[in-house]
Amino acid sequence: MATMNPLEKKARSSFIKGILVAGLIGVLIAALLGYFLYKKNEDEKARIAAQREVTVLSTAVKSGEEITSDMLTIVKANAEVATSGAISRADFLDMSEAVDEAGNILPIKVIAKIDIPEKSIITQDMIMTEEDAVTNDLREQEYNMIILPANLEEGDTIDIRFRLPSGEDYIVLPKKKVKMSDLGGTYSADTIILNVTEEQMLVMSAVIVDAYQINGSKLYANKYTEPGIQTAATPTYVPSYETIQLISSNPNIVTTARNELVNRYNETYNSYRSAISSALGSIDEGSRTSAVESGTSSEVASQQTERRTYLDSMYGVEE
């Protein structure tokens, strides 16, 4: 039997060892590749699982313009984007719809706070509802001549209404959130603070004068029962012709709003103003002037008294 010489034996042994080592390396490489592929697959699954639906604007809008649901496209976004305030379609619908007591769906306008380019992901800080819109002419205004509900509290939502002695009842300012006048820790019984626009200030001034002139009229507030789901009432009070003219020429009122208001007031003037004009026509001018002077004097005196009370409570001094 032929025997393998030592050199051949050594070469054969080295060859086998080489194959085994190469095989082992191949197995390790395959295992590592399998692990990396598995990890990549799991990471991709985790990334997809972490995605959520967000809304993308399909057309550019300007600040103050309305955004409707048909202007939105739904896409999937990574968690990093989704957690930066991005809203889903469900979030948008929650903002743009309310349900009344009868179960009817009521639309609420959603408005862009800023200019938003096309294909932008919509975030919470880009949009607001019409009820939350803040305009450049919005101001805090105190009123102490409005008859208030006995149970009115801070944060309640009210309509300001005006009732004539004959029973006609007008909505002056709809759905206003109340801030109570704080007199150093004690709320005023008569004074409330409302956020009002320039136009609303003029309308309130007009109705206050009407209320002072017409004996037996009532300027009052009534509360919403569920302001979160109730939409704002439609204003029906029409101010005097002089106030309408002032609104039409006031540069502090946004042009589009001014034109819309003037058109609405002119169209409804005879329908809604006739009863007020009739009531005023039955009172002689001297009596009307005297009533306005008396009402204004009482209003100023009340404000001065509450101002002294506030300063005294805060600083121990009177103005």
Image: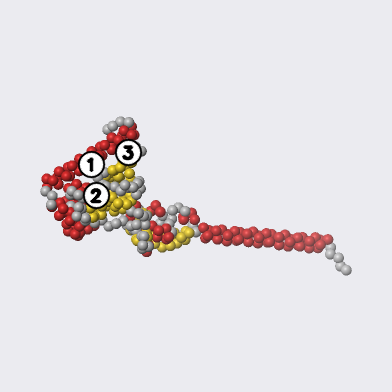
Of callouts 2 and 1, the N-terminal one: 2
Does the rendering let one see residue 108? Answer: yes
Instruction: Tell me how far mark 3 sits from mark 2, CA to CA.
Output: 24 Å
Percent x, y of residue 54: 44, 59
Q: Which residue is mark 1?
A: 299
Q: Which residue is mark 3?
A: 183
Of callouts 1 and 3, the N-terminal one: 3
Asked if disc 2 and disc 1 are in contact, CB closer than 8 Å, the reply is: no
The quadrant of the picture occupied by the C terminus is top left
Local secondary structure at mark 3: loop
What residue is shown at x 48% (from left), y 54% (from top)? 80
- Amino acid type indicated by mark 3: Leu
Instruction: Tell me how far mark 2 sits from mark 1, CA to CA.
Output: 14 Å
Q: Which residue is mark 2?
A: 219
Of callouts 3 and 2, the N-terminal one: 3
Percent x, y of residue 115: 35, 54
In the rendered image, the vertical position of residue 71 relative to residue 207, given as above or below = below
Does the rendering let one see residue 197? Answer: no
Asked if disc 1 and disc 3 are in contact, CB closer than 8 Å, the reply is: no
Among the 4 quarters of the image, the one containing residue 167: bottom left
Q: Report crowding for label 3: few under 14, some 14 to 19, many 20 or more residues within 10 A (C-alpha).
A: some
Asked if disc 3 and disc 2 are in contact, CB closer than 8 Å, the reply is: no
- Amino acid type indicated by mark 2: Leu
Percent x, y of residue 76: 47, 61
Tell which of 37 and 252 is nearer to you: 252
